[in-house]
């Protein structure tokens, strides 16, 4: 492994309080890493996954919990310049990864209704399968605090349900595989600050749909972006809004909700109303 880059060092110095400390807290509070784990850290080329790979590489050296890391990168059909930028950033950050090729973009580009959902589902399944092939029992993804908050609000506004993005979960169709999210407590603004302070430029989504939107200078129109903007506006008046949304998922009082379910078993407030 090459010597630590300035960007790696900054995680434990300049950004220790904003990034490294909350990452370690999430790992501890949610029991994300256990002794002997072999973790595939999925490096997509974006800022979040690159930061995650750097932070876990640093943590592995000092942690009293022994674990193994394998960088894992899928090439879903990148243009040569996109692949080259990812490889340049990997070298600059002193990271190593296992590359494998798929035709994901080719498949997704034929979808017109909801290409992003299809891309996410196919990408996740492919990563599960490859991680298992490499002997990994966990994959680490770069979802951060703001992703969690946005998912919570998206579920309410557009899904008609109360649910969130959990810090870890077991894969339903891949026995022995678990997803962990070590950046669960890290704010996106701090990841952006780390990126800018280190003078880094990462890959945005490079699928055909995103590339066309950038070429035509079209504004972002996804529901997630709309929710991100709503939260940003609310935080201008109350900087606790995002934290309150996050904490609401830890303080659900089932005595004050109309209904809830655990698996297929459903309940309503009427079940015990007359007792």
Image (cartoon, rainbow, N blue to C red):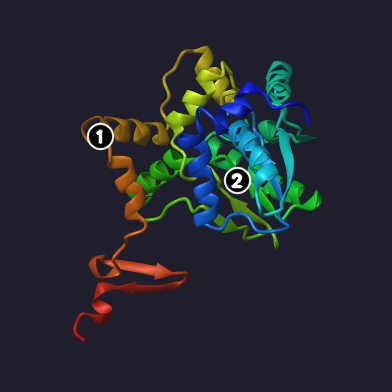
Relative placement, left or right, of 78 versus 217 is right
Residue 120 visible to the viewer: yes
Q: Could you say whether the residue bearing mark 1 is in a helix, strand or loop?
A: helix
Q: Residues within 10 Å of mark 2 (few under 14, many from 20)?
A: few
Task: Tell me the quarter of the image containing the N terminus.
Answer: top right
Residue 130 drawn at (x, y percent) = 76, 46
Say which label, 1 or 2, has the lower sequence index.
2
Which is nearer the eye, 153 or 218?
A: 153
Residue 217 drawn at (x, y percent) = 46, 13
Q: Residue tagged by mark 1?
A: 234
Q: Residue at x 70, y 24 (%)?
A: 78
Disc sitting over residue 121 in the figure:
2
Which is nearer the eye, 87 or 113?
A: 87
Residue 94 drawn at (x, y percent) = 72, 27
Residue 124 drawn at (x, y percent) = 64, 45
Q: Residue at x 48, y 25 (%)?
A: 192
Q: Exactly how many numbered labels are in the figure? A: 2
When the figure is inspected, residue 162 is found, relative to residue 229, above or below; the finding is below
When the figure is inspected, residue 213 is found, relative to residue 264, above or below; the finding is above
């Amino acid at each position: 492994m090459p010597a630590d880059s300035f960007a790696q060092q900054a995680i434990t110095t300049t950004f220790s309080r904003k990034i490294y400390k909350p990452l370690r807290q999430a790992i501890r509070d949610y029991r994300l890493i256990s002794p002997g784990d072999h973790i595939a850290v999925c490096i997509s080329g974006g800022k979040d996954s690159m930061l995650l790979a750097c932070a876990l590489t640093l943590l592995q050296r000092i942690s009293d919990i022994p674990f193994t890391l394998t960088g894992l990168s899928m090439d879903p059909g990148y243009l040569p310049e996109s692949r080259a930028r990812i490889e340049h950033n990997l070298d600059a950050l002193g990271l190593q990864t296992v590359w494998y090729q798929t035709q994901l973009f080719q498949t997704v580009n034929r979808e017109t209704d909801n290409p992003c959902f299809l891309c996410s589902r196919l990408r996740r399944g492919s990563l599960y399968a490859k991680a298992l092939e490499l002997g990994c029992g966990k994959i680490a993804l770069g979802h951060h605090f703001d992703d969690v908050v946005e998912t919570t609000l998206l579920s309410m506004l557009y899904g008609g349900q109360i649910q969130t993005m959990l810090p870890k979960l077991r894969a339903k169709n891949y026995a022995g595989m678990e997803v962990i999210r070590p950046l669960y407590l890290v704010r996106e603004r701090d990841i952006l600050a780390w990126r800018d302070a280190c003078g880094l430029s990462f890959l945005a989504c490079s699928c055909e749909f995103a590339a066309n939107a950038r070429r035509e200078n079209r504004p972002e129109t996804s529901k997630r972006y709309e929710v991100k903007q709503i939260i940003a506006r609310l935080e201008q008046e109350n900087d606790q809004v995002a934290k309150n949304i996050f904490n609401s998922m830890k303080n659900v009082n089932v005595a004050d909700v109309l209904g809830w379910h655990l698996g297929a078993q459903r309940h309503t407030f009427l079940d015990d109303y007359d007792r």
